[in-house]
Amino acid sequence: MTSSVEARSAYAERVTVTNDALSVELSDGRTLSVPLVWHPRLVHETPAERAKWHLIGRGVGIHWPDLDEDVGVLGLLAGRASGESQQSLDRWISRAALPPKQHAADS
């Protein structure tokens, strides 16, 4: 088990997303790789959309602005998958299929 001291000193530096996995290279030399199905929003998007990420909080997490998805390093270290409900994911999928002007009208 990872201690809280070890977890706090590990920050994301590089991210790779394939069709099957999310891999994160950490500042302490470790590389974490988890099944992409743990983060369903990433599964439902194209490789180009999955490539549009940036680090948040100096590497404590990864953010995909186009997908409204955040993945934290501590969650990855703890082996936690996304906690998003199927209902929330279904709403996001249906909204993502709408033209941009339709989104504004729904808000």
Image (cartoon, helix red, strand yellow):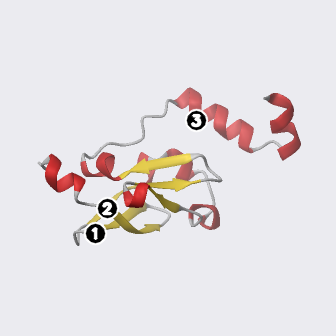
Identify the residue position indicated by label 3 in the image: 89
Q: Which mark is residue 73?
A: none
Q: Nearer the viewer, residue 30 or 91?
A: 30
Identify the residue position indicated by label 1 in the image: 27
Vertical comparison of 42 with 95: above or below: below
| Mark found first going from the N terminus, 1 or 3 | 1
Dividing the image into 4 quarters, which one contains the C terminus?
top right
Identify the residue at image location x=37%, y=54%: 60
| Mark found first going from the N terminus, 3 or 2 | 2
Is residue 33 toward the left or the right of residue 4 in the image? right
**Structural crowding at the residue carrying mark 1, measured as other residues with C-alpha within 10 Å and reported as few (<14), some (14–19) or many (≥20):** some
Identify the residue at image location x=73%, y=38%: 95
Q: Amino acid at mark 1?
A: Ser
**Structural crowding at the residue carrying mark 2, measured as other residues with C-alpha within 10 Å and reported as few (<14), some (14–19) or many (≥20):** many
The x and y percentages for residue 3 are: 12, 48
Q: Nearer the viewer, mark 3 or mark 2?
A: 2
Residue 99 visible, this angle: no
Instruction: For the residues labelled 3 and 2, say whether their Cβ atoms are less than 8 Å apart.
Output: no
Q: Amino acid at mark 2?
A: Tyr
Vertical comparison of 62 with 105: above or below: below
Q: Which mark is residue 11?
A: 2
Identify the residue at image location x=63%, y=62%: 49
Cα gap from disc 1 to disc 3, whole angstroms: 31 Å
Identify the residue at image location x=63%, y=67%: 48
Instruction: For the residues labelled 1 and 2, say whether their Cβ atoms are less than 8 Å apart.
Output: yes
The x and y percentages for residue 54 are: 52, 62
Could you say whether the residue bearing mark 3 is in a helix, strand or loop? helix
Q: Nearer the viewer, mark 1 or mark 3?
A: 1
Q: Amino acid at mark 3?
A: Leu
Cα gap from disc 1 to disc 2, whole angstroms: 5 Å
The x and y percentages for residue 18 are: 48, 67
